[in-house]
Amino acid sequence: MNVLAFWFSDHIAHDVVLHTHDFHQLIYCKKGGGYITVDNTRYKALSGHVYISKQGVVHSIEASNDMHLLEIKFFADDS
C-alpha cells in the first residue's frame, strides 16, 4: 500500500458543513470537544479520540470554542 500525506494542520477548530473529499482524512481531537459527523453518524468528539473519514464519505465538524484538532489529509492505494 502506498500512502501520500499531503496536508497536516494543528489548529483551533471551526464549524465545517457536510462535505466530501477525493482523499482520506484523519482527525485527532487534541483538546475540547464538539461533534463530528461521519457517513451520517454523529459522534461526540472527545479529547484524545481519533476520527477517520474515507475518500468520498460525507462528514462535518461542529466545534466548541475550545476544540483543538490535528488533521492529516492523505491518499492511499493498494499498489
Image (cartoon, grey):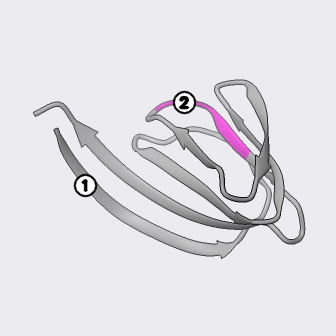
Which image quarter is the C terminus in? top left
What residue sits right under mark 1 in the picture?
Answer: 4
Q: For this view, does 60 lie left or right of residue 71?
A: right
Residue range in magenta is: 56-60
Q: Nearer the viewer, residue 73 or 43?
A: 43
Residue 9 rendering spot, x and y as whole percentages: 52, 71
What residue sits right under mark 2 in the picture?
Answer: 57
* Badge 1 density bin: few <14, some 14–19, many ≥20, Cα 10 Å: few
Amino acid type at mark 2 = Val
Residue 74 rendering spot, x and y as whole percentages: 36, 52
| Residue at the extreme left | 79
Where is 68 relative to 73, above or below? below
Q: For this view, does 61 lie left or right of residue 3?
A: right
| Residue at the extreme top | 40
**Along the polypeptide, which appears first: circle 2 or circle 1?**
1
Mark 2 lies on a secondary structure that is loop
Residue 2 rendering spot, x and y as whole percentages: 17, 45
Mark 1 lies on a secondary structure that is strand
